[in-house]
Every structure is written in structure tokens, then in C-alpha cells.
Image: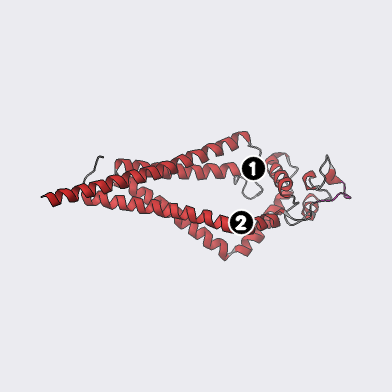
Amino acid sequence: MFVEFKKCNMASGFLCCLKYMMFLFNLIFWLCGCGLLGVGIWLAVSQGSFATFSPSFPSLSAANLVIAIGAIVMVTGFLGCLGAIKENKCLLLSFFIVLLIILLAELILLILFFTFSDKVSENAKQDLKDGLSLYYSENNVGLKNAWNIIQAEWNCCGVTGFTDWHEALKEKVVPDRCCQEHYQDCGRNVTNEFWKRGCFEKVEQWLDDNKHLLGTIAMCFLVVQLLGMAFSMTLFHQIHRTGKKYNA
């Protein structure tokens, strides 16, 4: 009788510990999602003119991406928090399935990216070049601001070089931010010195220089997702095995 009581206490203690570990884990996850959502909304409101480089995907802006990621993280964290604290098997299973779908989507995108990396790179270059022709159009202020910022910050010009602007704008002019010595209408003076390297090459170089850091961040995200899945399934099986809720 004493042995059975001891086993029951040990099982209940493990369930209680696991429950609160998962709750805290997902509370942090949920708070991060709220933070990302808040930043995304702030970007959309205060920096609404900063949109996207791509004319094919006009909604693919920094603000929209942050809002989408924040919403997904917040909803996932909420499922985990509520499922853990309520010991609800349906919510825990939903949390596991959502994380599994996200993980599979990430793996599929990663495999497709590395399999068709050359084609993705060429299509991205062409799409960006097509977008250059919209630089001076009134309905694409966001695209103009995006190019001004990246060219000024990265000391680059165009997609593969400053001649991309000549082809896109049908005249030998470049944005003022392409000038090594920036002043009003400097891009219309063909005798000025412009940044020689294209922005696409600069981005590729940055990614290559920081591949170890980016790989470490990706591994941390992977570990967090796997821990969340492991916690949810372990708690799910513990609740299923006990056959009743344990209120700590």
C-alpha cells in the first residue's frame, strides 16, 4: 500500500513539474510572439512607406513578415500554455501538430532552396531588376525607400551593378544614394563615382560571412521546436496514463 502511494506521488510530482516547465517554456514563447507582433504593427504604422524590393510580391514587406511570424509564434505559444496549465490533451496535441507542420515546412523550404539555389538566385535577380523600373512611380514609394536605404547602408548600387539602373530607367541616371559622394541630383551626373558592386552580391557576401552565426541561430530554433514537441507529447502521455487531471 505504501509503495503504491509513493508511486502515485512520484508520478504526480513528475506531471506537476513537467506541466509548469512546459507552461513557462511556452509563456516565454508567447511573449516573444507578442513582442514580434507589436514590432510588426509599429513598422506597419510608422514605417508604412518601407515596403518591398519585389514587384511580384508587393505584400512581402518587412512589417508584414514580422506580423505573420509574430502571430504564428503567439498562437502556438498560447496553445502550449493553455494546454499545459489545463492539462488538456486536445490542446497539447494541437500544439504538437502545429509545431510539426512548422518544422516540416521549414525542412521542405530548406531542401527546395538548396536543391534549386542557382535557379532561385537567378529568378530573384531578375525580379529585383524588374522592380527597378518602378523606382520613380508614385504608387511604389515603399520600393523607392527600400532601395535608398540598402544602397546607402551597404554602399552598393543596383542589383548586379549601377548599369542595372540605366537599363531599367532607359537613361544613364542612377539614384542619388548610388553616389560615393552624396548630394542632390548627383546620380544624374555621369562623371560622378558610383558604387561599383551590386547589392545582391553584397547580401550574398554578408550571408557567407555570417553563415556560422546564422547556422547557430537556426539550430537554436530547431532545438526549441524539438523541446516543445517533446514536452507536449510527454505531458500528453502522462495525462493519458493517469486517466485524470492532476491539479497542483
Inspect the image, locate mark 2, and give the three-letter code of the amino acid beneath it.
Answer: Asn
Residue pointed to by mark 2: 210
Label 1 Cα crowd, 10 Å radius (few <14 / some 14-19 / many 20+):
many
Question: What type of secondary structure mainly makes up the magenta span?
Answer: loop
Above or below — where is 139 with respect to 164? above
Residue 7 highlighted magenta (yes or no):
no
The residue sitting at 79% across, 55% down in the picture is 196
Secondary structure under tag 1 reads loop
Q: Position of residue 76 (x, y in %)?
A: 42, 45
The CA span between labels 2 and 1 is 25 Å
Q: Position of residue 46 (x, y in %)?
A: 62, 34
The reply to whether residue 79 is in sight is no
Residue pointed to by mark 1: 51
The range drawn in magenta is: 189-194
Q: In the visual, does 230 lie left or right of 183?
A: left
Q: In the visual, does 193 lie left or right of 139?
A: right
The residue sitting at 66% across, 38% down in the picture is 49
Q: Which mark is residue 36?
A: none
Q: In the visual, does 168 lie left or right of 84?
A: right
